[in-house]
Amino acid sequence: MRIVHMSDTHLGYSAYSKIDPAEGVNQREADIYAAFQRAVDRAIELKPDIVIHSGDLFDSVRPQNRAIDFALRQLIRLSEAGIETVLISGNHSTPRLRETGSIFRIFEHLEHVHPVHEPGGAKIVVGDTTITAIPHSVSPSLPDLVSAAMISKGTKYNVLVLHAGILDSETYKMDEFNEQNVPLSSIDGRWDYVALGHFHRFAKVRENAYYSGSTERLGFGEASQDKGLVEVDLETHEATFHKILIRDMVDLPPLDAAGMASSEILQKARDLASTSSVDDRIVRLVISNVSSDAYKSLDLPAIRRLGASALHFELKVEREEAEGSVEAGEAHIGLLADEFKKYVARLEMTDEKKRKILDLGMTYFTKEEES
């Protein structure tokens, strides 16, 4: 019995202001779709008995029609391939109120597709395997549900699917306001496989318990991470990570500008940018310990032009005050800009109107950075 495990596809996520010229949608949103499609391509190639998606199929509780349509088309591909597919709702796609209803209901009519979104979870039997699927839940709590989960004696193999952070000597969590965390000790060691979702890096938590990680990078904290899915043989307990091709994200080495004049900072920034191609990549440069005098004459537009060919070039400048403390400065504005982009992406309006609002709003953030 072989399974393919993927997670945290975050369909509908968007960031930055670049538009995909072919589709006319936010480029990062298009990247997210492309990554999921490649993951499904690979799953179909591997021809497993079961595909498991361990949460956060969508980036929000109320995804846009475009994200819903794309998800449906990919799940239909798995259905038509005859692969039993189990997916649970994660913290990003679980409504706070049950009365809101879950988008996962639209998948219930698909043959071979088993969406699990109700609190308490469900057991799905596929051949000689029982899958105990526990979606995100606040009441009852996930720790209680996991502790109470029973291994079935009626099948040869038992798989637990869970979307949560894991607390142990090493902690696996995303520090999101609504995440649920489960002590590793509460997970029965007799499960043949534990398919974990929520933590975005591929990680082995213990024997037969893995995070597959997200299928795309959703922040610079993930810049160095490979993305993909996990193939598992339940008989041999062998787990193999399959990397998928996604857009490069580059976190340039930080530039410590202590004691530097503005001209020196600019030259060092040029040197760093020239060490790696930035074309069509997502790139960040952090410059720290910039003195007040150097900051006043620092040519920020010239530094930004170093990333003109990038999909997105993020510049963060941290200024050093006389007493040695560091103020967020542009870093704070950068975070606000990212939040503004996410807010606009979720507005219920046409893409053209979103672009106009985004372009107008970003001009104010740029003015604030340069003031």
Image (cartoon, rainbow, N blue to C red):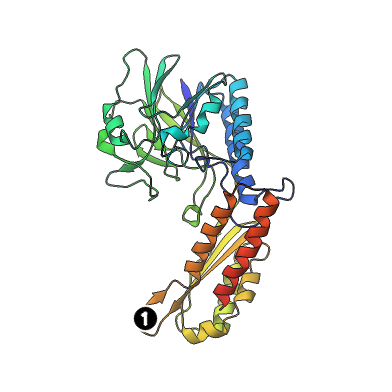
- Give above or below for 257 relative to 284: below
Q: Residue furthest right?
A: 22
Tell me which residue sits at (61%, 32%) in the image. Answer: 41
What residue would you read off at disc 1?
A: 324
Q: Residue furthest bottom?
A: 293
Q: Residue furthest front?
A: 99
Judged left or right of residue 103, residue 183 is left
Q: Amino acid at mark 1?
A: Gly
Crowding around mark 1 (Cα neighbors within 10 Å: few <14, some 14 to 19, many 20+) is few
Q: Quadrant of the rendered structure where residue 238 is? A: top left
Tell me which residue sits at (64%, 39%) in the image. Answer: 66
Judged left or right of residue 267, residue 203 is left
Q: Position of residue 28 (x, y in %)?
A: 61, 50
Q: Residue furthest left?
A: 185
Looking at the image, which is closer to me, 10 or 309?
10
Tell me which residue sits at (34%, 41%) in the image. Answer: 180
Q: Position of residue 286 (x, y in %)?
A: 50, 68
